[in-house]
Image: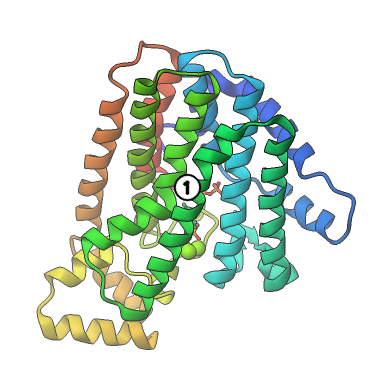
Amino acid sequence: MTLFELSSISKPVSAAMVEFNRLYEATLSTCAEPMCSMMRHLNQSRGKQIRPMLVLLSAQLLGEVTPSSYRAAIFVELLHGASLLHDDVIDESDLRHGRASLNHVWGNRSAIIAGDYLLARAVSLLTVHHDEYILGNAIGSASDMCEGELMQSAKSASLDINEQEYFGIIARKTASLMATCCTLGALSIKASSKDVESLREYGKNLGIVFQMRDDILDYVASSEIGKPVGNDIRERKLTLPLIHCLEQMPQHERTAMLDDIRAGRHIDAIAKTVVQSDGIAYTRQRMEEYGDLALRQLQGFAACEALTSLQDLVAFCSERSW
Ligand code: IPE
Ligand code: IPE
Ligand code: MG
Ligand code: MG
């Protein structure tokens, strides 16, 4: 249980989230099999929907949610969904939201096509309504996510990564899209460029917090997250808890641990060493710094329920167990 529950965070936009879900389902309704069954599988196990929530809260903070805010929210959730479908293929992961991933049920080829399908649906949604600003802003994040994923793959091959490179990867693979969500919410109600910029920076820092927590959760078992634990080491993904642990080790121990990671040996023991080191505490401390940066961006906005929710999201993202 986390102190800040998503259900209360989403309250200021709860009616808008219901409408978002109705429109999202309609966007994915299709009668051609087997795509139809795959979309049904996805619709049956939704995620946290933090990205559309960010769009709608950012819009609500400064005005009223508009039809264009909904399309922005759907666009980012489809882009995110596509990235997860492709990510589970890349990571050979058979579990998502606590149930079988699409690649596990239908195979890699179909899962990749389903990801492309989500992207196609996202783009077609915009062409009907001429929301060029959505594509214009979100496409940069789509490129960032691809770049981040490839940088991560390269680092998994070399096993040579420092802290700065780690932050470069998570900024691209996760934080960029969250920054875009806030930007789009603000743009959908024609906010001033100063407010757009503050919200973009808030979203970027929140995204970094979000991914750091995800990387901690890989070492701290949680039945709620519905994703395998210890997978990052198995995938040779060196995240901050492990990077920091390695940096503190004498050279010969570091070499031995990297050899084990390369060979896929003693994964549980490595995870235990990381947990016993101060790798997690250090990651938490850095995460709090980014959380503070996110909160600072919100200081100029007038108090309202949406503002409280955006503030509480920082705490949720740093404490979440799912
Ligand atoms: C998972 O994101 C991918 C990461 C960036 C770690 P979420 O944890 O937000 O996924 P859903 O939306 O709840 O499925
Ligand atoms: C999620 O990355 C994919 C993107 C952020 C594009 P991860 O591989 O780290 O996340 P999970 O653990 O599978 O959700
Ligand atoms: Mg993954
Ligand atoms: Mg991955």
Position of residue 230 in the picture relative to residue 282 (left or right): right
The spot of residue 94 in percent (x, y) is 61, 68
Q: Quadrant of residue 209?
A: top left
Position of residue 90 in the picture relative to residue 221 (left or right): right
- Decide: is 221 above or below 1: below
Count of labels shown? 1
Secondary structure of the residue carrying tag 1 is helix
Q: Residues within 10 Å of mark 1 (few under 14, many from 20)?
A: some
The residue at the point 67 percent across, 68 percent down is 103
The residue at the point 48 percent across, 54 percent down is 143
- Decide: is 81 above or below 270: above
Residue 136 in view here = yes
Q: Residue furthest left?
A: 250
The residue at the point 37 percent across, 11 percent down is 303
Compare residues 138 and 168 and report the one nearer the observer: 138
Which amino acid type is shown beneath numbered disc 1?
Gly
- Decide: is 151 above or below 142: below
- Decide: is 231 above or below 222: below
Q: Quadrant of residue 313?
A: top left
The spot of residue 273 in percent (x, y) is 25, 72
The spot of residue 187 in percent (x, y) is 50, 25
